[in-house]
């Protein structure tokens, strides 16, 4: 598992250098999230990625439902998703998810998620979203547009140790 | 299991008497539908009830998405759901679901579902839906309205043995 | 909505009289929980009922995964579920769920759930579970058995205002 | 969309050259699969990937549940998943999924999925699974082991046009 610790440390280094806004949430694995192998059915991790992204925007002062109204954006459609599964989790386990934007492109951005279980990296994944406005000429279609500076600024600003969430830090982080 | 057979027979009697339109679909239990007890996680049955209701309307020539446009209805919100679980199903099992309207009220209706597994009644359930139009005076609200006669007629007409679905009849029905 | 308030008050009366152990959890409605009607897809409420039941047993000092090992029970299979939907909820809403056992039978029990949204009763539902042990003579089968007194006692004992969960009480309760 | 057609053609070329066993299933998008944006909630695609994988093994004469018993394998845990989303799908749409193994490694393999909607590539994704046996010395743990030749052979053999599934070929393929 040393490999995972190194990776996790790298993430924090990234955070310090690029001053990204990081949000953490706690996820409890429920009975219905697990499959006959007695571990989380993998599609649920992607459901949780979406929950993490939603929480990240909300924590940064950009709740998605309001954002859509205030910024002329009609959605942030997902164009790519990826996950690597290192440690399975089972019913009753607690996962600590940390999420931040790790890449800004012209009209899209990448959100990375790390799920820690008992201080070890259990899952890592990423989502690529497009910033989309209503299509200027075609009804019911959307068009990718440049990201507003306010959104980039709020999700790039460091928020230190993310005290707001009240999530106790998992063991691996304390050691660092 | 004799009890279940009797119940199932009663259902067919009901169908003959009231001449209800019955639709049947086949559901294969997938790995991700099952929980650590190695059986279908019960919330998935309600997901399938919705799928059955959708298929029932479509088979009766009333596909829900078009219906909303053509009949001034903005939805058929669910106000009650109920299920009884007799036989658990596991990964790889095939379920034969049969659904029909079993009660017409002024502005609502009840859809009943029976799920058969190897010819035995495994699950039975019901959903009560309201027929709802846009509220005449309040924006973004809905109001229950009387059901259109066309909808009642199409879902009440007998469709015999429902040949369209191509579902091979489960054992219990062959014996009848 | 007066009707719902009355019902909710009745629930608390029941709690006081029968001294049932009540647990409360907070549920945030996520984007992926909602359907094209922009409200919670109803099957998710049943998923949350299971989460509530799991939390109820855990809060009463009877975590289900340990219970199965320590009490010779191999599961608490669900035999019936029911829900009534009064107020729809949408992405971003917070629901306060309160759950307690409302009926003890010989080998089964009923858990009732109430979901409050902004102080109003949004959903109420119930689940009937059987207490099941391994079948004495047939492999891979289960048999309903009488509930252990410890389980009945712990889930019947009043826990007052459920301070543990730290859930702020919804408005309707404060008025009472 | 020309880009997608090219990609799809490339897939068929791959199939011819490497003689991979390809399975096709049809997926109907249900109401509950969609989110408030009125399109499939992305986590459901991963649920369907699992369904495709299950169907692929079954079609190749290697149903997973039996495989686990007969081949000493205790599971095929997922270690990586990836998807790219090109065209959104909505309630009522029909998707044609085609799946095959695209890479054999020592103790793992990659399954690729393509979802076609109206003849266009809507989604493509992949899953990397490990072939796992019970750990020789540690209880409740698993260990990756070399894939049985029978499994490789059956999933590598060409099956021509996959007539078994009865899925009518989407438009793009007819043109080819």
Image: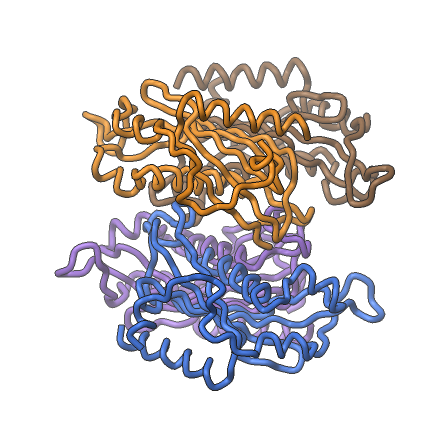
Chain colours: A orange, B purple, C blue, D brown
Q: For the point 55% across and 31% down, which residue is it?
A: A124
Q: For the point 40% across and 36% down, which residue is it?
A: D89
Q: Quadrant of residue C130?
A: bottom right
What is the residue that sits farthest to the right in this orientation?
D137
Q: Please count the marks in the image.
A: 0
Query: Relative to D88, does residue C114 appear above or below in the rendering?
Result: below
Query: Relative to C3, does residue C60 appear above or below in the rendering?
Result: above
Residue D96 picture location, percent across and down: 51, 33
Q: Is residue D103 visible?
A: yes
Would you say A107 lies left or right of A163 here? left
Would you say C135 lies left or right of C26 here? right
Please name whichever residue, A65 or A134, is drawn nearer the observer in this view of the structure: A65
Residue B69 picture location, percent across and down: 25, 49
Q: For the point 42% across and 78% down, which residue is it?
A: C11
What is the residue that sits farthest to the front in this orientation?
A175
Would you say C32 lies left or right of C59 here? left
Please name whichever residue, C159 or A105, is drawn nearer the observer in this view of the structure: C159
Q: Quadrant of residue C121?
A: bottom left
Q: Quadrant of residue A74?
A: top left
What is the residue that sits farthest to the left in this orientation?
B137
Q: Quadrant of the N terminus of chain C?
A: bottom left
Query: Relative to C24, does residue C144 appear above or below in the rendering?
Result: below
Residue A8 picture location, percent across and down: 56, 29
């Amino acid at each position: 598992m040393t490999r995972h610790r190194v990776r996790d440390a790298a993430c924090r280094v990234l955070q310090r250098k690029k001053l990204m806004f990081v949000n953490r949430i706690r996820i409890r694995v429920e009975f219905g999230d697990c499959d006959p192998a007695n571990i989380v059915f993998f599609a649920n991790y992607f459901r949780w990625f979406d929950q993490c992204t939603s929480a990240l925007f909300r924590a940064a002062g950009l709740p998605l439902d309001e954002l859509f109204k205030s910024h002329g954006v009609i959605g942030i459609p997902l164009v790519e998703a990826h996950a690597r599964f290192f440690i399975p989790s089972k019913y009753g386990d607690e996962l600590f998810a940390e999420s931040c934007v790790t890449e800004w492109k012209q009209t899209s951005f990448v959100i990375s998620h790390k799920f820690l279980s008992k201080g070890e990296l259990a899952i890592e994944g990423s989502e690529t979203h497009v910033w989309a406005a209503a299509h200027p000429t075609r009804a019911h279609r959307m068009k990718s547009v440049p990201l507003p500076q306010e959104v980039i600024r709020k999700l790039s600003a460091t928020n230190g140790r993310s005290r707001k969430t009240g999530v106790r830090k998992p063991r691996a982080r304390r050691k660092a």
